[in-house]
């Protein structure tokens, strides 16, 4: 058997700024670019302190670890690949933050459905680009929770199609940016739309 490949990604801000984390490399795994993360956490800076964040298609876990570095109190990292979740646990140990990190090796939609009553303040959604339907399904499940997340971060190649669904599900797009072929959205749940007849 060949040795598993690993790569590194750097935390860009907060208490662990400059720290490098190793992650298990697979063909579909592309950690959010540093400039995209910098923009995202500039957007979230007034909101992130003390929050519980969910990184649903965690991959390298960098969005979750970045959130902790920049003020979140707890993150849940979910990925369906065992090698990825094992590496995220090692990263949590390296940063001495295992008490603030929950790592789950599980299918994303199964995790959401089994955690129906759990509330997250911020949810990061950055699944493989080749599965846009998975992104729509995840947003739909989150929107129908008893208490939907206040903020969604979405990264995709096809945000136009996603935005048509967001408005109907009660999420307003507040910020957007683009890097290469990826576009990112920050969306806020509009609680005024939550009341149903």
Image: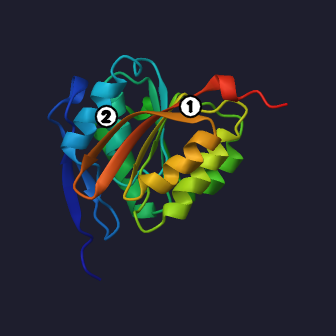
Residue bearing mark 2: 40
In this picture, is 91 found above or below 5? above
In this picture, is 113 found above or below 19? below
- Which sits earlier in the primary sequence, circle 1 or circle 2? 2
Q: Position of residue 94 (x, y in %)?
A: 28, 39
**Which of the two residues, 95 or 42, is positioned nearer the viewer here?**
42
Q: What is the residue that sits farthest to the left in this orientation?
A: 18
Q: Quadrant of residue 45?
A: top left
Q: Position of residue 3 (x, y in %)?
A: 24, 74
**Residue at the (64%, 48%) spot, across then down:** 140
Q: Nearer the viewer, mark 1 or mark 2?
A: 2
In this picture, is 173 found above or below 8? above
**Which of the two residues, 6 or 45, is positioned nearer the viewer here?**
45
Residue bearing mark 1: 120
Q: Position of residue 139 (x, y in %)?
A: 58, 47
Q: Which element type, helix, strand or loop, lies under badge 1?
A: loop
**Residue at the (40%, 24%) spot, across then down:** 72
Q: What is the distance, in whole Å, between disc 1 and disc 2 at their CAs?
A: 17 Å
Neighbor class of circle 1 (other Cα within 10 Å; few <14, some 14-19, many 20+) is many
Residue 111 in view in this figure: yes
């Amino acid at each position: 058997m060949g040795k598993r490949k690993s790569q590194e990604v750097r935390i860009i801000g907060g208490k662990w700024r400059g720290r490098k984390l190793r992650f298990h490399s697979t063909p579909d795994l592309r950690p959010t670019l540093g400039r995209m993360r910098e923009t995202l956490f500039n957007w979230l800076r007034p909101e992130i302190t003390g929050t519980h964040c969910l990184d649903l298609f965690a991959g390298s876990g960098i969005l979750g670890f970045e959130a902790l570095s920049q003020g979140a109190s707890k993150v849940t990292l979910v990925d369906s690949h065992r090698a990825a979740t094992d590496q995220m646990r090692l990263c949590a140990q390296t940063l001495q933050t295992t008490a603030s990190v929950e790592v789950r090796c599980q299918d994303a939609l199964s995790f959401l459905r089994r955690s129906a009553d759990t509330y997250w303040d911020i949810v990061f959604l950055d699944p493989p680009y080749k599965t846009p339907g998975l992104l729509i399904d995840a947003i739909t499940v989150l929107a129908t929770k008893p208490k939907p997340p206040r903020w969604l971060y979405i990264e995709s190649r096809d945000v136009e199609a996603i935005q048509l669904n967001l408005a109907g599900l009660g999420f307003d797009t507040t910020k957007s940016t683009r890097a290469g072929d990826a576009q990112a959205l920050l969306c806020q749940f509009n609680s005024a739309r939550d009341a149903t007849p």
